[in-house]
Amino acid sequence: MKAPRIGQRKKTMRLTKTSMLSGTTATREIDLTEEELDAYHASGRPIQQMFPRLPPEDREFVMTGITPEEWHRFCPNSESDPDESS
């Protein structure tokens, strides 16, 4: 995917997921298109390979529905990025 030109709007989507930790439903604005998300689900490839441009908290949300706030609430002593273990 090409980097956006200056002044060009990035393509993002509002993604709604249910957290695997709490069952809470949340929506986040993620720098993905629907086509990219479909390709990820069909590929079976690790999310880090498919979307290296995404911050770890966005990749975690795409995979599990866990928000950064939830991650820190349920794993307060965690110093690693949420998707390092994926």
Image (cartoon, rainbow, N blue to C red):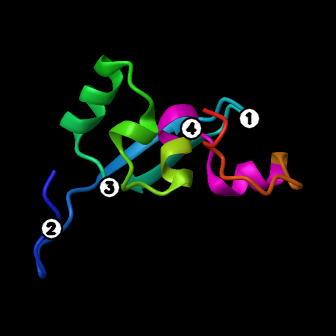
* Residue furthest front in the image: 49
Name the one closer to the observer, 45 or 8: 45
Q: Is residue 66 magenta?
A: yes
Tell me how far mark 3 sits from mark 2, CA to CA. Answer: 11 Å
Tell me how far mark 4 sits from mark 2, CA to CA. Answer: 27 Å
Residue designated by label 4: 65
Badge 2 density bin: few <14, some 14–19, many ≥20, Cα 10 Å: few
Q: Which mark is residue 22?
A: 1
Up the image or down, 44 lies above or below 9; here it is above
Q: Residue at x 44, y 30 (%)?
A: 46
Q: Which mark is residue 31?
A: 3
Name the amino acid type tagged 2: Pro
As helix, strand or loop, the secondary structure at mark 4 comes to loop
- Please provide the residue range marked out in magenta: 61-73
Badge 3 density bin: few <14, some 14–19, many ≥20, Cα 10 Å: some
From the image, state whether disc 4 or disc 3 is nearer to you.
3
Name the amino acid type tagged 1: Ser
From the image, state whether disc 3 or disc 2 is nearer to you.
2
Name the one closer to the observer, 2 or 29: 2
Tell me how far mark 4 sits from mark 3, CA to CA. Answer: 15 Å
Q: Which mark is residue 34?
A: none
As helix, strand or loop, the secondary structure at mark 2 comes to loop
